[in-house]
Image: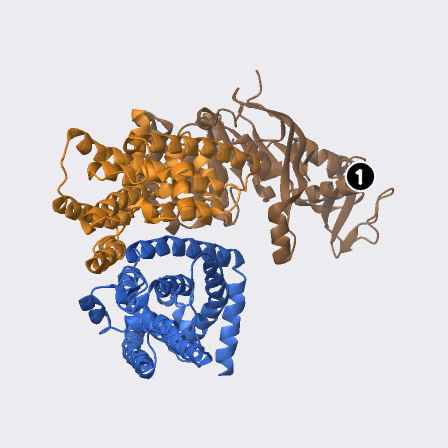
């Protein structure tokens, strides 16, 4: 296990070194990526100047939802860069998976180590700034449980969205064409989770409650931390389901990944 | 001693999606895909002893690469048994690949953007090579392969020959007992090819590495292999020594003769008349019926001769004939 | 002119071969429309009109935004800068057509295919779930087509200008991302400009960005009507000319630089 970790760090450090080679380009990338993402929150901020709130959520409360999920998605996108379905399908088409299979190390570890897109730092940073803005402007009554919930949300969100990346990459073992559906789930999931879930039509909310239970990742923990009443009347433990959702999704995705890999090994490309 | 590679009744069939044309066709494909089956490898069996260098030959699409992919654990066969080093490649991939080296000539196994040395150094923790062994192997290989001048160059900027040398070093740095080479000299110039052949011979003789290689360049085979296997359309047509191959399939040899003086008639009784040009003549003969020694003795008895040379047909021609004869059998 | 039409045709044919990509894009844009419509409904919160924009109008605004992403290339294009970096721009520069016109033809072919496949189909699907309003008169349609065509021209000129950054810096991609972030925000694509606070939408109207999207949609919705129509289209035309003028100056300097330094 320690050996695996050190190998992973070594692979990542190589990635970083090659990205830092073009330093100027690197920083413009970080900054413009941050700006691009920030423009979406900025626009919400502006529009709430006129409307005051959305579904009973103030600007600062919206900033909490948005900041959390942006930090997590940015972190996930960095950590799971190798599993980004778009780049992974390219990886397969170039036949690079054969090279990976020839090495006496777990395939997943090598894919994790194959990319680490530092540019996402821009997205994480703008998310963090928005979250700080939220925390400064919100009168949260902090308890140890609430403080502890923040990192748990972060890790669970990374795990859940990373699981979707992994599942999307696994799909490319069969087809390059159906990846778009997963992209709608991942990128769409971030979009959906950055708003209060009550704004969505019932069927969409049902989908994100029972099929892909994103509602427990951001919305419910936020309700708990911000002391907002539950408008949907789900059980009282709902705010604490995030780690379960993240864990189960990641577990299922890794099983699916194994199936996909053995499919690849029985068909080749 | 048990063989290091044992392949029994190997089959590999692929399903290929039959695409229907047009937009409607694409829709039908999605709903009820129609597959056709292609057999890439059919009932192939062979064994390799430790220390052998064996050429695995065949025309494009014969199933060579599929076999190599099965043997290196990249591909799971449809049926058949493979035991290499006492392991089944695809069942215990991680432990198995530690003991083999593999090169696919058309694609580098190194990290594209990294300098060669960084790539090689990454292999040390991957294969858990003791630091001391790693350093001495690296020293030896970079001397033999002349790597020093481009150790700090990224793989993507290497010439094909340099890349292949770096790949060879990478494939052997963890001291595998087996080396699989898929087209190791493809696209290289004569000098680079020779360099690589010398290196392969060296690791085979000095380190006892068993080598299985596919190639289209028969000079590779003549230089490296004592034994060849010939594959066509997934079936093994021939498995034996190069001498045996020659013996069995090269029937017509040619004796080139330069005479001291011009003769009216240089034909020998019972032989086809030679092709003549001035003082030069070429006798085509079936070496299974007449030995070259016999033929030369008869010529020397009758004529004054300056020079003699026996030429066998090039291996390429022999192999081409094997494919052709197989065609006739079918 | 014949060459221009020929280039458009080539580009249409090329686009049409990416059928799966077209469908995938359509599906993605459609779902996003759904998410965004939910936000609008929640914002309106029972109000039927905000700052001259009805709820139906705002929902239609979102739908048109999603439908026009590909037609107006609202997320930006990076093709021209790629040819600067790869050097293949050289073969475009020796053609008997100005670079601006050459890329316009390529872009237009791509846009027209997307207008039909991703634009009209998306609007049709969207209309099944949400109220989508349409111009009431034939004249309304004529003005709409003119205004959307003008939007396309302004969008194209803006993207052409942004791509020229590649002549000066190896970082044009990053700069482009930043520039397109700005144009998405200020063109009204993210949120209809009328829903922003007064000061911000007035600020936006000082830039060329509303001319590449907001104006077209407001003409379609009839929010801009009567005597304002001529004025609105005039502003679009003015920005197009300004952007063309700017890009020609910059392009000339860029080519001079390319020639002197040998690329």
Q: Under tag 1, what secondary structure?
A: helix
The crowd level at tag 1 (other Cα within 10 Å; few <14, some 14-19, many 20+) is few
Where residue C124 appears, x then y in whole percent? 49, 62
Q: Which residue is mark 1?
A: B329
Q: Which chain is orange?
A: A
User: Is residue A189 left or right of B68 when viewed as pictured?
Assistant: left
Closest to the observer: A78 or A148?
Answer: A148
Give the x, y percent position of residue A118. 27, 47
Question: Can residue B172 be seen by looking at this rendering?
Answer: no
Visual hue assigned to chain B? brown
- Residue A124 drawn at (x, y percent): 24, 46
B65 left or right of B321?
left
Q: Which chain is blue?
A: C
Q: Farthest residue in the top direction?
A: B1
* Residue nearest the viewer, comparing C251 with C149: C149
Question: Which picture quadrant has residue B42?
Answer: top right
Q: Identify the chain of the residue marked 1, using the numbered disc in the image.
A: B
Residue A96 vertical placement versus A59 (above, below): above
Rendered image quadrant of residue C84? bottom left
Which residue is at 46% across, 39% downward? Answer: A170
Residue A25 vs A164, above or below: the answer is below
Task: Determine if residue C254 is in view.
Answer: yes
B45 shown above or below C37: above
What residue lies at 84% left-to-right and 43% top-to-bottom?
A: B271
């Amino acid at each position: 296990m320690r050996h695996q970790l050190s190998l992973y760090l070594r692979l990542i450090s190589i990635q970083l070194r090659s990205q830092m080679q073009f330093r100027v380009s690197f920083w413009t990338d970080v900054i413009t990526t941050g700006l691009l993402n920030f423009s979406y929150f900025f626009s919400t901020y502006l529009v709430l100047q006129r409307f005051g709130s959305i579904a009973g959520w103030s600007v600062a409360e919206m900033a909490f939802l948005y900041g959390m999920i942006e930090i997590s998605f940015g972190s996930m996108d960095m950590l799971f860069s190798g599993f980004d379905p778009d780049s992974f399908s390219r990886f397969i088409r170039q036949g690079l998976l054969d090279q990976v299979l020839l090495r006496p190390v777990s395939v997943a570890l090598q894919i994790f180590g194959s990319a680490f897109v530092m540019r996402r730092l821009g997205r994480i940073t703008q998310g963090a700034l928005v979250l700080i803005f939220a925390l400064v402007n919100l009168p949260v009554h902090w308890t140890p449980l609430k403080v502890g919930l923040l990192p748990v949300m972060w890790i669970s969100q990374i795990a859940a969205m990373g699981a979707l990346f992994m599942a999307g990459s696994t799909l490319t073992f069969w087809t390059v064409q159906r990846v778009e559906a997963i992209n709608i789930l991942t990128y769409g999931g971030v979009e959906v989770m950055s708003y209060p879930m009550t704004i969505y039509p019932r069927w969409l909310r049902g989908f994100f409650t029972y099929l892909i239970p994103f509602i427990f990742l951001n919305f419910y923990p936020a309700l708990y931390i911000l002391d907002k009443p539950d408008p949907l009347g789900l059980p009282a433990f709902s705010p604490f389901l995030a780690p379960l959702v993240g864990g189960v999704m990641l577990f299922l995705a890794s099983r699916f990944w194994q199936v996909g890999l053995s499919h690849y090994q029985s068909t080749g490309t | 001693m048990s063989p290091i590679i044992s392949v029994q009744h190997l089959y590999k069939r692929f399903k290929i999606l039959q695409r229907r044309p047009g937009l409607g066709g694409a829709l039908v494909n999605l709903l009820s895909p129609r597959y056709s089956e292609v057999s890439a490898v059919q009932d192939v069996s062979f064994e390799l002893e430790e220390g052998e260098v064996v050429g695995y030959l065949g025309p494009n699409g014969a199933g060579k690469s599929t076999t190599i992919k099965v043997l290196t654990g990249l591909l799971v066969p449809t049926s058949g048994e493979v035991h290499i080093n006492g392991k089944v490649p695809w069942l215990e991939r991680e432990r198995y690949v530690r003991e083999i080296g593999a090169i696919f000539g058309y694609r580098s196994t190194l990290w594209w953007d990294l300098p060669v040395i960084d790539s090689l150094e990454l292999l040390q923790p991957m294969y858990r090579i003791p630091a001391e062994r790693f350093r001495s192997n690296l020293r030896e290989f970079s001397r033999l392969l002349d790597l020093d001048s481009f150790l700090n160059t990224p793989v993507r900027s290497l010439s094909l020959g340099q890349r292949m040398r770096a790949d060879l070093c990478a494939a052997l740095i963890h001291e595998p007992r087996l080396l699989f080479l898929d087209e190791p000299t493809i696209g290289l110039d004569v000098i680079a090819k020779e360099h690589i052949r010398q290196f392969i011979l060296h690791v085979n003789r000095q380190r006892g590495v068993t080598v299985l290689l596919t190639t289209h360049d028969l000079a590779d085979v003549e230089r490296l292999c004592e034994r060849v296997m010939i594959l066509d359309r997934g079936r093994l047509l021939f498995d034996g020594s190069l001498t045996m191959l020659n013996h069995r399939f090269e029937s017509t040899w040619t004796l080139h003769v330069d005479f001291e003086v011009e003769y009216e008639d240089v034909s020998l009784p019972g032989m086809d008349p030679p092709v003549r040009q001035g003082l030069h003549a070429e006798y085509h003969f079936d070496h299974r019926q007449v030995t070259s020694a016999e033929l030369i003795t008869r010529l020397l008895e009758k004529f004054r001769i300056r020079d003699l040379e026996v030429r066998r047909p090039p291996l390429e021609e022999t192999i081409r004939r094997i494919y052709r004869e197989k065609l006739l059998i079918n | 002119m014949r060459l221009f039409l020929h280039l458009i045709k080539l580009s249409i044919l090329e686009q049409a071969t990416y059928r799966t990509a077209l469908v995938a894009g359509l599906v993605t844009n459609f779902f996003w429309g759904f998410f965004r419509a939910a936000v609008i409904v929640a914002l309106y919160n029972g109000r039927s009109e905000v700052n001259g924009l009805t709820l139906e109008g705002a929902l239609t605004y979102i739908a048109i935004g999603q439908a026009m992403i590909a037609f107006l290339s609202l997320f930006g294009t990076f093709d021209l800068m790629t040819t600067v970096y790869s050097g293949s721009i050289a073969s475009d520069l020796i053609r008997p057509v100005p670079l601006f016109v050459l890329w316009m033809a390529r872009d237009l072919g791509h846009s027209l295919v997307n207008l039909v496949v991703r634009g009209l189909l998306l609007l049709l699907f969207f209309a099944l779930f949400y109220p989508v309003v349409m111009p009431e008169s034939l004249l309304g349609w004529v003005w709409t087509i003119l205004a959307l065509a003008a939007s396309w021209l302004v969008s194209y000129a803006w993207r052409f200008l942004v791509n020229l950054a590649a002549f000066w810096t190896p970082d044009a991609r990053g700069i482009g991302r930043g520039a397109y972030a700005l144009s998405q925000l200020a063109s009204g694509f993210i949120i209809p400009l009328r829903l922003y606070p007064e000061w911000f939408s007035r600020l936006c109207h000082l830039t060329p960005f509303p001319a590449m999207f907001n104006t077209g949609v407001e003409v379609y919705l009839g929010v801009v009507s009567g005597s304002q129509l001529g004025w609105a289209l005039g502003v679009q035309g003015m920005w197009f000319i300004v952007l063309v003028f700017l890009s020609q100056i910059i392009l000339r300097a860029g080519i001079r630089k390319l020639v002197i330094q040998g690329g």
